[in-house]
Image: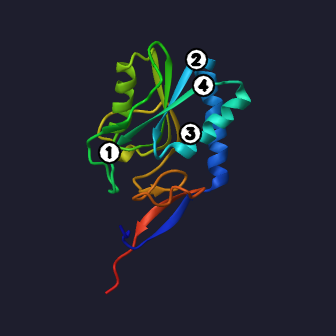
Amino acid sequence: MKLPPHRLDPLYTADELRDRVQALAQELCQHVSGNDVVIVGVLRGSFMFLADLVRSFHDHAVHPKIDFMTLQSYGAATVSSGNVRVLKDVSVDLADHEVLIVDDILDSGRTLHFATRHMENKGASKVSSCVLLDKPARRVLQQKADFVGFEIEDRFVVGYGLDYDNQYRELPFLAEVVHLEQET
């Protein structure tokens, strides 16, 4: 699919992301129960954030178990469909374990709400969440993340794992997608 004409306006540099992720890791390592925590990354958008976050855990002698789940609510669109589906579930037994959900963005609140309930239903003793971006203007459910990298306005953002129809995930920075008027 060819994307409509657009440009990318940088929001956060690679250095700003690195510094914030390291600070979040320090906060999280004070919060989690050491080596008993299972970190569940919500794919695909969280993969870069999760990798950098977990690498920083090493500096704090925290050695979590790591698993992933794939949830879908966007598809090729730039706004959530409102329906969350499990495309790939976790494979680790979560019964009586502390779980930290790591996601790329908290937008409508539906995905994080769904993931939190899903972990609780799998028997997690405690569920907390960490998101790279929080976009409160788009909230439909009163869902909050326990840890937030950056709060942003209502913008469509790509890079550092976040995509626009599977493009731009590889960018080492975050940028806003600005759609351009079609020239006639």
Q: Name the image quarter holding the N terminus.
A: bottom left
Q: Nearer the viewer, residue 77 or 105?
A: 77
Q: Position of residue 32 (x, y in %)?
A: 58, 21
Q: Earlier in the sequence, mark 1 or mark 3?
A: 3
Q: Nearer the viewer, residue 151 or 77?
A: 77
| Residue type indicated by callout 4 | Pro
Q: Earlier in the sequence, mark 4 or mark 2?
A: 2
Mark number, residue 36:
2
Q: Position of residue 49 (x, y in %)?
A: 56, 43
- For mark 4, what is the residue? 64
Q: CA distance from mark 3 to mark 4?
A: 12 Å
Q: Earlier in the sequence, mark 2 or mark 1?
A: 2
Q: CA distance from mark 3 to mark 2?
A: 17 Å
- For mark 1, what is the residue? 73
- Tell me the SS state at disc 3: helix
- Tell me the SS state at disc 2: helix
Q: Earlier in the sequence, mark 3 or mark 2?
A: 2
Q: CA distance from mark 4 to mark 1?
A: 27 Å
Q: Earlier in the sequence, mark 4 or mark 1?
A: 4
